[in-house]
Image (cartoon, rainbow, N blue to C red):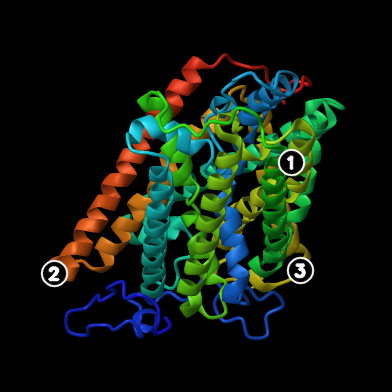
Amino acid sequence: MSPDTPDLDLETRPAEPLNRDETYKQQPETTEEEPFGDEEGAEVRYRTLEWWFVSPGSAESTRSLMDVAYEQEMRDSYACRRNLSRHPNASLGCGDAGNRPVGLPSSVPVLYQWLTVNWQSGVILIVGIAILTVYTGCVMGQFKARYPHVHSIADGGEVLFGWIGREVLGTGLLLCLVFVMGGHILTFSVMMNTLTDHGTCSIVFGVVGLLISLILSLPRTFKRMSWLSVISFASIVAAVLVTMIALGVQRPRNVKVEVTRSTSLYRAFLAVTDIVFAYAAHPAFFGYISEMKTPTDWPKTLFFVEIINTTLYTVTGVVIYRFAGQHVASPALGSSSPLMAKVAYGIAIPTIVIAGVINGHIACKYIYVRLFRGTEHLHQRSLFSIGTWVTISVVLWTIAWIIAEAVPEFNNLLSLVTALFCSWFSYGLCGAFWLFINKGLWFSSPRKTFLTIVNFILLGMGGCLCGLGLYASGRAISEESAGRSFSCASNA
């Protein structure tokens, strides 16, 4: 860790206290080696990532849980925008169309009444969650430094709870990632229906999304995937700029920046979870660190990506809400005119596709490393090694497509799965990791006592997000009418 990195109190042994320069140089308490072993002379080398290459990929994982929710939002808000274009003076409340906003604009109005302060509370919540994300990410870096063999959340679960923890968390990780993959395929289908005005059968669009995602996820290393993330990041920034400029030029009529808005606890909590899960990239962190050329640079990556994410969320949200007011759409890219909304969605295509591809790569890598860890197949370009990787990718993406097409209320089910697992992956487990590596030192100093309280709060936060998230998602499933499986009808 660099000398200018904030001290996060990483002491773990009473007899040999660690300073911040020694944080990632401590001797591990395990005899197991790095997941990729000795790569000298290997055909495929994984530990090649520089810290600045990790940042775009981490940002994509962070945004992915928001992107997968486009389907219901685009279906509701696009119809709302078309109506608004015909009746520009109508107050349609487009900001209420959909419960999973992309960025701040739709979340903050929903939070007003619940937080009973003002719109700045939404910004404060975003910044607060960003700080928690940096802290919990650093805790995962500490845990990885102590146990270098850890490559995934499942490996961390094995350290904490034995083989049961490995299997339970591994199953949860795969389930969550496959649902996110399916969400991106469905999102691609909705996007194409929106842009083409239902140019063909929705299933065809879904298959096209499946094939594109499968092809893009075939590289075996994160370094190659990181180039895709750069393209994706550029596309979402461009799409956001187009939306903000269009709003500034068009200036919708009768815009009101509301201080309060009546809402229910159920919808308010959905808005809170939107912001919380917007930072939920933690399932990818162990994998990123495992492929870094210099793992001690992990804090640089973490600070860099969260500064970018937080700036993007807050600036985009405040500017769009300032110009769109009560007409803000969900997702935010649809807040301008229907034509400019289509332009913004078109520019955002790489983000919609690639964010899902990154999660697909993580899922495939988890299975691949678990199968071949410690064998020569992990680093070979043989027919068997490549064939296994391709087979895993085909199977996972096909399962994701089938689930997305077969389950009528897929997005609500996705929300339920992410609430069940991501609440623990991103917050609860991080508290458990810190408490585990600091066992016996919880109250050894005032600072340790404070951090012990913080990490117990993280455990409680994971449980709260899980419980209330399951309640909100379950209620959404019960309130919405079921659609049809494998339907050619437009889903936009």
The residue located at (74%, 51%) in the rendering is 350
Q: Position of residue 333 (x, y in %)?
A: 66, 40
Circles 3, 2 touching at the beta carbon (< 8 Å): no
Separation (CA) of disc 1 from disc 2 = 51 Å
Quadrant (top left, top right, bottom left, bottom right) of the C terminus: top right
Q: Earlier in the sequence, mark 1 or mark 2?
A: 1
Q: Secondary structure at mark 3?
A: loop
Task: Report x, y in % for residue 251.
Answer: 67, 37
Q: Tell me the quadrant of the picture where the N terminus can be found.
A: bottom left
Q: Looking at the image, which residue sits at the far front?
A: 254
Q: CA distance from mark 3 to mark 2?
A: 55 Å
Is residue 57 or residue 272 the one in the foreground? 272
Residue 263: name its quadrant.
top left
Q: Nearer the viewer, mark 1 or mark 2?
A: 1
Could one spot residue 441 in this view of the protein? no
Please state which of residues 108 and 354 is positioned toward the viewer in this rendering.
108
Q: Which residue is mark 2?
A: 446
Which structural element holds mark 2? helix
Q: Residue at x 52, y 70 (%)?
A: 301
Mark 1–mark 3 distance (CA, rounded to whole Å) = 40 Å
Residue at the disc numbered 3 = 382
Tell me the amino acid under the disc marked 3. Ser
Q: Residues within 10 Å of mark 1 (few under 14, many from 20)?
A: many
Name the residue located 45 percent from the left edge and 70 percent from the top edge.
Answer: 149
Q: Amino acid at mark 1?
A: Tyr
Q: Position of residue 488 (x, y in %)?
A: 79, 21
Mark 1, residue position: 345
Is 55 positioned to the left or the right of 348 in the image? Answer: left
Pointer 2: residues within 10 angstroms few (<14), some, or many (20+)? few
Give above or below for 177 relative to 358.
above
